[in-house]
């Protein structure tokens, strides 16, 4: 390894560390401030004055060798289902800003590690790249759903409020007729629903046979997220 390559590697590692730190600190701080600002809306919800809120999301499809993980058309059915679940269960209107296909994705970002590595992935090349696509900290109110090649052990991953994105592996979209609730489930994690539920009818049930239900309390937590606003 040449001297310049070694220096380049060190600079890249420092950049990854900065990106991961800004993501985690900024993400959690943005969520805290968002919930603080939205406390009156939370109170309104508690007393039954539940007005429709908005959540802006976008799909980002990664690629390998110039070939997207999936065609954009494969997202349509899942997007329709996700919109319906949030509308019926939490009175949230999901607005899609765009579907973006990204070319030249690094291999590290296409294969997401298992849960054992947890948030450590945010301090790697993969984390820096995905944060760059979705925006970090206070720089966006949009929740991105990023389609990757594979995810160890699970078909989806959320980093809670530490990021502005969730990742879903491509096989969940390969058949447009095979509509999945996984996107809504991972978005629930990103919006503050940290724990899984034991009831199969609940959207936060861990297994793929989950239902669509959000409890009254769950829906209020989601409505208080940094991604959900009245305007």
Image: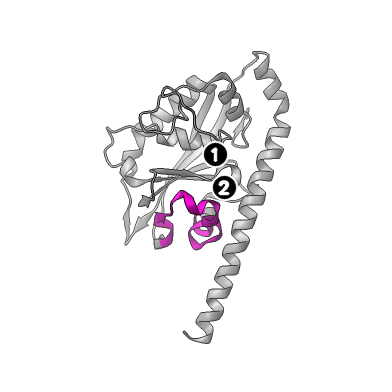
Q: Main secondary structure of the magenta part?
A: helix
Residue 125 highlighted magenta (yes or no): yes
Q: Is disc 2 surrounded by few (<14), some (14 to 19) or many (20+) residues within 10 Å?
A: many
Please determine whether, in this image, residue 10 is positioned above or below residue 89: below
How many numbered markers are drawn?
2
The residue under label 1 is 190
Name which residue lies at 46% across and 21% down: 213
Q: Position of residue 149 (x, y in %)?
A: 35, 52
Q: Determine whether the residue tagged by mark 1 lies in a helix, strand or loop.
A: helix
Q: Earlier in the sequence, mark 2 or mark 1?
A: 2
The residue under label 2 is 163
The quarter of the picture where the C terminus appears is top right
Residue 13 highlighted magenta (yes or no): no
Side of 113 relative to 221 (left or right): left
Q: Position of residue 164 (x, y in %)?
A: 56, 45
Q: Determine whether the residue tagged by mark 2 lies in a helix, strand or loop.
A: loop
Name which residue lies at 33% across and 51% down: 69
Side of 104 relative to 11 (left or right): left
Q: Are marks 2 and 1 in contact (CB under 8 Å)?
A: yes
Name which residue lies at 45% across and 33% down: 184
Instruction: Tell me the distance, in whole angstroms, between the alpha carbons under discs 2 and 1.
Output: 8 Å
Give the image quarter of residue 34. top right
Side of 6 relative to 231 (left or right): left
Q: Position of residue 94 (x, y in %)?
A: 50, 30
Q: Position of residue 85 (x, y in %)?
A: 45, 25
Give the image quarter of residue 36. top right
Q: Is disc 1 surrounded by few (<14), some (14 to 19) or many (20+) residues within 10 Å?
A: many
Q: Nearer the viewer, residue 35 or 201?
A: 201
- Most extreme residue toward the top, as rendered? 48
Give the image quarter of residue 45. top right
- Write the start and end of the magenta stretch as one range: 108-130
């Amino acid at each position: 390894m040449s001297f310049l390559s070694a220096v380049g590697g060190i600079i890249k590692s420092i950049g990854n560390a900065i990106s991961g730190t800004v993501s985690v600190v900024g993400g959690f701080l943005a969520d805290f401030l968002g919930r603080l600002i939205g406390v009156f809306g939370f109170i309104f919800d508690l007393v039954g004055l539940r007005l429709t809120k908005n959540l802006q999301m976008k799909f980002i499809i990664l690629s390998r060798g110039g070939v997207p993980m999936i065609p954009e058309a494969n997202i349509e059915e899942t997007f329709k289902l996700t919109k319906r679940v949030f509308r019926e269960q939490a009175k949230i209107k999901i607005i899609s800003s765009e579907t973006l296909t990204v070319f030249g994705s690094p291999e590290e970002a296409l294969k997401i590690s298992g849960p054992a590595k947890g948030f450590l992935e945010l301090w790697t090349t993969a984390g820096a790249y995905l944060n760059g696509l979705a925006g970090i900290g206070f720089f966006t109110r949009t929740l991105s759903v990023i389609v990757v090649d594979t995810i160890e052990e699970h078909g989806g991953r959320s980093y809670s409020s530490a990021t502005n994105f969730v990742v879903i592996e491509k096989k969940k979209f390969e058949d447009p007729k095979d509509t999945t609730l996984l996107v809504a489930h991972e978005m629930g994690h990103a919006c503050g629903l940290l724990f899984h539920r034991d009831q199969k009818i609940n959207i936060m049930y861990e297994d793929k046979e989950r239902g669509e239900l959000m409890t009254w309390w769950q829906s209020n937590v989601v409505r208080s997220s940094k991604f959900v606003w009245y305007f």
